[in-house]
Amino acid sequence: MGNSIYEVRRRAVLALARSQVRVDALLVSRGADVGYLSGFSGDDSLLLVGVGLACLITDGRFAEQAAAECPDLEVIVRSGPMSTAVAGVARGHKIRRLGVQGGHMTLAAQAALGAAVGARCRLLAVGEVVLGLRAVKDAEEVRSIRRAIGIAQRAFRGLIAGGAKALSGRTEREVAAELDYRMIRGGADSPAFDTVVAAGAHSSLPHYRPGRARIRPGQAVLLDWGAWAGGYSSDLTRVVFIGRIPPELAEVYEVVLAASQAGLAAVRAGVSAKAVDRAARAIIERAGLGERFIHSLGHGLGRGRGNAEVHEPPGIGRLSAARLRAGMVVTIEPGVYLPGVGGIRIEDDVLVTAGAAVKLSTLPAAASAMVLR
Amino acid sequence: MGNSIYEVRRRAVLALARSQVRVDALLVSRGADVGYLSGFSGDDSLLLVGVGLACLITDGRFAEQAAAECPDLEVIVRSGPMSTAVAGVARGHKIRRLGVQGGHMTLAAQAALGAAVGARCRLLAVGEVVLGLRAVKDAEEVRSIRRAIGIAQRAFRGLIAGGAKALSGRTEREVAAELDYRMIRGGADSPAFDTVVAAGAHSSLPHYRPGRARIRPGQAVLLDWGAWAGGYSSDLTRVVFIGRIPPELAEVYEVVLAASQAGLAAVRAGVSAKAVDRAARAIIERAGLGERFIHSLGHGLGRGRGNAEVHEPPGIGRLSAARLRAGMVVTIEPGVYLPGVGGIRIEDDVLVTAGAAVKLSTLPAAASAMVLR
């Protein structure tokens, strides 16, 4: 068991943490990070990683599950406060310098833990070393993401197979719920984040929440959805047209599609994330729509789930400092939003390699393929 | 607009913060808190509250929405980092002592903000004053919770109306997905958290995630679900029996039901949360099952959504320090879990008043009503 993938990851994370700040051990508190480093799939549990130390601190609700999922870990089932339990392990292992996840631990959690460990143990904030390690996927992880993409794509294809009448006359929310239901029946554990279905002018709000508006013939409908399956997420966006392409969006669509292609073509190991953003953004700026592209081009994709965590490093935007590395999986999602009119966004998921990017999502993107009759 | 409910809440929160620590203004970062104090329903935005200051800092994705939802707020659409934008407002309003949410702000966010505001402005962690205010609901909020409960109950009734064959032979995940779909068709904006459907021995894991196991005749199936609608959550649990009550769970069910009734009867303004937990727990302990009740009796319920946030103050457990106040809405959810056999949990939502608690959920709980034929 000592050479499990989790053990290898824990060693790497500890080394990365120690390259930032001298610590005896690292306390991992972000749920997705705990799972990545232990195989544990429950919540509300912390992982303490040190040399010869891998200890999961959980509570009674997860005791059975932790024992089954993490046979190579020391599992502590706390009954008192989490901070007391962590302090007990720190004392037992003579930890004097304990790293904590600065990007996840709150000020209140730090205060409680600091009081519990006392003066003999210092808490030291460590940067996002686990997210950094997570950014580069191994073959098994890429397979999981492919599977999550496949589930999302089949759900979308199933939805639009009914043609215009599968959407027209229904509310945005009903369509979103059907897409979610299809993903789960197709093998997802849950949607990866809140599914967006935005009809007509609503699509100019990039994070619109589907509402009671009924979809009408002639409208553009933006769908942004993904599946979470086996611990990994997919994230896709398409705009479909009910019967015809609204004339005021036809040209915008072609601009966004060209930007998507330019972005995808720019993805390659060694390239700066900023340069990828620029490649796509330049197309939109050249069309005079630069001010209508109001977000970053893309983001890393992996274990993160939910609106807040599905966006992982590397960010691909104007201000990004990251450089792409082989094994990263990122979204490329240029968008143009015309307030009161509508928005177009096209989002695909790609694997970075030393050569041309491998597009993992395979839905067509041509406007003609998106017209539902 | 100056006397909107949001304005009243902002004044109260500022006063509460100042009763803890001297601050010129409070930076509100938790999304549900931002919405509670502003009416804004988007994400990734912060609210700065001071005397004569109510400023929402958002980004281009939410600019249109913020203007529409928060007409009485100053809205700043940032293009650079959040910390820079906050620092700009702090400078403009001569804020020297800025409160931050200690229970939400991370160490990394504090470090970035501290660097941006510089030496002339101190950051001071404030306790959970917004959650404290949120714990007591006004009439409009209670109506919203009632509506979220009604949606969840109708979805459950619709699901089990089909009798045993509505569940038997289907996977846990399919049943969970159908319950979610029914809630959304019934008016929910989303499920309030990940729906639990746990069949047979799986129900002994209180936070089991529904899987590919097929539900079989003779099994007990635990369902824990809720709707999120109009910004408020419901949270319910029932155990249904496919055809018959498994003999090994019959007595346990009656113990949990009696504990539920004792807990509900103990809820009243002025009573300590600990005493309510004790009233229910005593029944389970008397039956010799105290060690199988491995979690708290209940928790506050309101705007929180998602597995991590649906549990709000007050916690109702053995270690709780809270005292119940009129207007609080809490869950009462005793449970007994027998590893390898199964678990029983019954969860209802109640409103605390000066007199007897008002049970907001109205599903039957008697074992006989839970047998599907």
Image: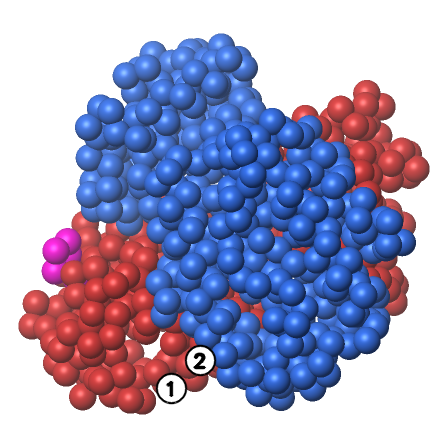
Chain colours: A blue, B red
Residue A341, image x, y percentages:
82, 71
Q: Residue at x 37, y 67 (%)?
A: A186
Q: Nearer the viewer, residue B112 or B302?
A: B112
Residue type at the position of mark 1: Gly
Q: Residue at x 61, y 43 (%)?
A: A299
Identify the secondary structure beneath mark 1.
helix
Q: Nearer the viewer, residue A248 or B19?
A: A248
Residue A313, image x, y percentages:
58, 36
* N-terminal label among 2 and 1: 1
Which range of residues does the magenta coloring cover?
A: B338-343
Does the image show residue A134? Answer: yes
Residue B15, image x, y percentages:
75, 47
Q: Which mark is residue B255?
A: none
Residue located beneath label 2 in the image: B182
Residue located beneath label 1 in the image: B158
Q: Residue at x 47, y 62 (%)?
A: A152
**Chain ID at mark 2:** B
Identify the image quadrant of residue B256: bottom left
Residue A326, image x, y percentages:
51, 31
Residue type at the position of mark 2: Arg
Does the segment drawn in magenta span residue B96? Answer: no
Q: Do marks 2 and 1 both belong to one polypeptide chain?
A: yes
Identify the image quadrant of residue A215: bottom right
Quarter of the image for the C terminus of chain A: give it. Answer: bottom right
